[in-house]
Image (tube, helix red, strand yellow):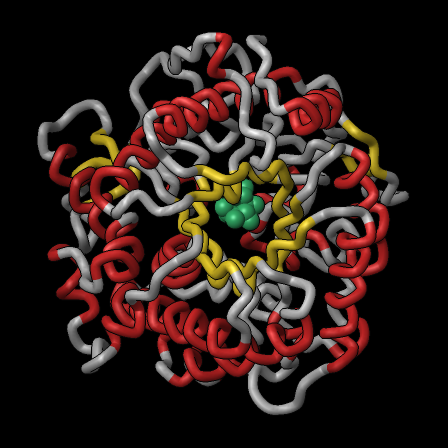
Amino acid sequence: MISRRGLALGAGAAALAGCAKQGPVVNLPPRERQFPSDFAWGVATSAFQIEGALTADGRGPSIWDVFPRSKIADASDGAEANDSYHRYGEDVALIADAGLKAYRFSIAWPRVVPEGAGAVNQAGLDYYSRLVDAQLARGVVPYATLFHWDLPLALQERGGWRARDTTSRFVEYAQLVVQALGDRVKHFIVMNEPMVHVFAGHVLGVHAPGLADASLIGPVTHHLNLAQGMAMQALRAARSDLAVGTTLALTPSRPSPGLFLNEAAAKGFDRVWNGAFLDPLFKGRYPETARDFVKDVVRDGDMETIRQPVDFLGVNYYAPAHMRFDLMSDAHIAPGDPPEGGELDAFGRQIDPGGLSEVLNWLRSDYGNPRVLITENGCSDPFSTGPAVIEDGFRVAYVRRHLEAVKRAMEDGSPIGGYFHWTLVDNWEWAEGYRSKFGLVAQDRTTGVRTPKASYAWFKALAETGALDQG
Ligand code: GCO
């Protein structure tokens, strides 16, 4: 089975060292290690990965509720996760106690509209209202993501993102959220990593809804783009005091060592993976390579709707992709190995903060230099079903080096306003289940008790001073 590691992108030999032993790649002199005082330091989570309580207070099922456990590495499911639905107060306290002033969380569409259309579940909206109030009471600014992959199951049964109608249902849901929370939530992130949802969920079948049909790339990509544009318009029509953006998983696509044809494979993958969401949003057109996929679903006026101004672009970055030419696959492109000898993360991806620099450079040179928030970055412990690593110096080293890349880009002219670490508490990592742990805080899965790791104290010191240490 191709896992998310395979998708993402380049599986090599098993990575056993967490994210350890990384030398500097970005040269940042001491005087440039100070972040501005208004830089937003935060953490990021997503509803399905933390909330649990899947049937509480009228929540409807999502596509992830029914995703087979046999497709999850530890045969687990998200039924419990961090039980944040009940323990959100502890989460907010951990955030505030770390001196963080920003929290990126996602709203579960099926809590708000259990059937995806029609009846509204007030209890679901009330939960998010309590969560927001808890943040504001501690001086934490809420950043709400509207779609982090948990589509209401009833909508999947009506075609999911393959169906154009889902875009209108998404707008109705966005309107409900902004009506209920827009007086207090001023930052909205419309989508999270739509291309991961397209590929992992619809082409590889390793994420919900578990479809493996390459012909879905076009319709699903286009309808996610369209829904995003329509929802941006709806949010702004509802209130004029919002900062509206969206989050993409951006990554340089590099050829795997070997065949010279890998070069073409990497280029093709880049245009689809990065270009099929960036170009419509910023340029109002699909890249050449993706046009064929979407030609049957794009209607007059769609591209104007998709090309909305953004108050910020959310960038999620973990690792570069390594791609190879593959005669056997439809598109002749497949995930390949990273170069030998490099440091790998737990997913087998090459650890390379230079990839983040590259992404930030493109945004400056090719996409009009939008305001950026780093809405996810972080690294997992080596995969294990055992307890988390509490002395997680490897995580500190990883984050430090990626923040060096961020600061360097700021010095070079990128308007970057914040960094949200993925994630607060070890949670349920999709196809990897509980064996992948990205948190600043560990969780005992039997008692739910949260224990801060070494990285929590380090991140707290950073958020409080804005000064990035040398390591
Ligand atoms: C993603 C999501 C997160 C993941 C994180 C770690 O990028 O897949 O936004 O939900 O948990 O990226 O892999």
Q: Quick check: 174 left or right of 42?
A: left
Q: Residue at x 50, y 73 (%)?
A: 235
Q: Nearer the viewer, residue 27 or 433?
A: 27
> Do we see residue 137 in this rendering?
yes
Residue 189 on image: x %, y % = 51, 58
> Do we see residue 351 in this rendering?
no
Q: Quadrant of residue 321?
A: top left
Q: Quadrant of residue 260?
A: top left
Q: Quadrant of residue 8?
A: top left
Q: Nearer the viewer, residue 190 or 196?
A: 190
Q: Quick check: 258 left or right of 53?
A: left
On-image quarter of the C terminus: top right
Q: Nearer the viewer, residue 442 or 145?
A: 145
Residue 48 on image: x %, y % = 64, 58
Residue 153 on image: x %, y % = 56, 76
Q: Residue at x 41, y 65 (%)?
A: 211
Q: Residue at x 66, y 48 (%)?
A: 103
Residue 209 on image: x %, y % = 48, 66
Q: Residue at x 67, y 69 (%)?
A: 183
Q: Count of labels shown?
A: 0
